[in-house]
Image (cartoon, grey):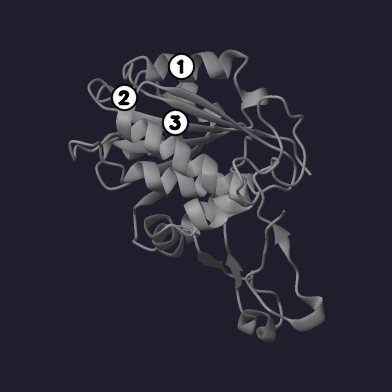
Amino acid sequence: DTVMMTTRLEGKVTRFLPFNQGTGGPGHRGGAGNPPAQGGKHATAYLWEHVWQRDAWLDILARFVHVEQTAPGKKAKATKQPGAVIFPRFHQWHAVRALEAHAREHGAGQQYLVQHSAGSGKSNTIAWLAHRLSSLHSLSDEKVFDKVIVITDRRVLDRQLQDTIFQFEHAHGVVAKIDQHSDQLADALAGAEAKVVITTLQKFPFVVDKIVELAGRRYAVLVDEAHSSQTGEAAKEMKAVLAGAPDAPVAELEGEEE
């Protein structure tokens, strides 16, 4: 009836996490587990029919699984600790693939909302989605987005979110964090090197008069904490900047803080 997963076998202390679809949907209140079995199939048939389907499984191994490095401590031995292997939860895997598939088919100009509960891996979902959209090509093999912009409403860049996105890309310059001034943001948006730009909502008002290259470009915008960052003057200024790129989609990722 249910599926559990782990990335590290440690005998009796092995930590298993649920890999279920949830019971939400027509006629069902959202909850843990899986919807009732249909058509004579097991409730867990999605595992081998979809997750273990050849292309999907190879995609998980190639573009989802990664090693999250342990933060070094003051003692030298802390740097020798093995990193944790990160495997997507079902809701993360499903959300990222669904958004990517829809954007590939319909192109820029769409809006999406992804809801996360506290502790359900919002930072990883944003990081997976940002990197996939930055290299996404349409069915006719044309690049869908020129850049991906990740926006957090905090005045200081979210360290966890920033580090998570950086871990997914090892090539220098592909990810740009805007932690200095508006000129840095303007250069990152106008330049060709950075594919993923991480910035705070508060920096957008200062870039309105500095970006003229937005016209004709397509930007994917991922807004962290959408429920608290889409009101006020800063949000209005952000939308004014993006008005130069009317096809810019917004994927809002909402979640309560732990």
Looking at the image, tell me whether mark 2 or mark 3 is earlier in sequence order. Answer: 2
Name the amino acid type tagged 3: Val
Looking at the image, tell me whether mark 1 or mark 3 is earlier in sequence order. Answer: 3
Please tell me which residue is depicted at 26% across the width and 21% down the height of the picture: 212
Label 1, on which residue?
A: 239
Distance, label 1 to label 3, CA atoms, is 11 Å
* Relative to 137, 42 lies left or right: right
Where residue 240 sits, quadrant-wise, is: top left
**Quick one: label 2, few (<14), some, or many (20+) residues within 10 Å?**
some
- Could you say which is closer to the camera, residue 123 or residue 243? 123
Name the amino acid type tagged 1: Lys
Distance, label 1 to label 2, CA atoms, is 13 Å
Where residue 138 sits, quadrant-wise, is: top left
Please tell me which residue is depicted at 66% across the width and 29% down the height of the picture: 25
- Could you say which is closer to the camera, residue 173 or residue 89? 89
Q: Nearer the viewer, mark 1 or mark 2?
A: 1
How many numbered tags mark residues here? 3
Considering every residue shown, the one lying at the far front of the view is 40
Label 3, on which residue?
A: 221
Q: Nearer the viewer, mark 2 or mark 3?
A: 3
Considering every residue shown, the one lying at the far right of the view is 12
* Relative to 107, 63 lies left or right: right
In the rendering, which numbered label is found on residue 211? 2
Distance, label 2 to label 3, CA atoms, is 16 Å
Q: Nearer the viewer, mark 1 or mark 3?
A: 3
Q: Is residue 193 above or below residue 221?
A: below
- Could you say which is closer to the camera, residue 137 or residue 1? 1
Is residue 123 among what the camera can see? no
Q: Is residue 70 above or below residue 217?
A: below
Q: Is residue 165 above or below residue 219?
A: below
Which of the image's four quarters has the C terminus?
A: top right
- Could you say which is closer to the camera, residue 137 or residue 160? 137
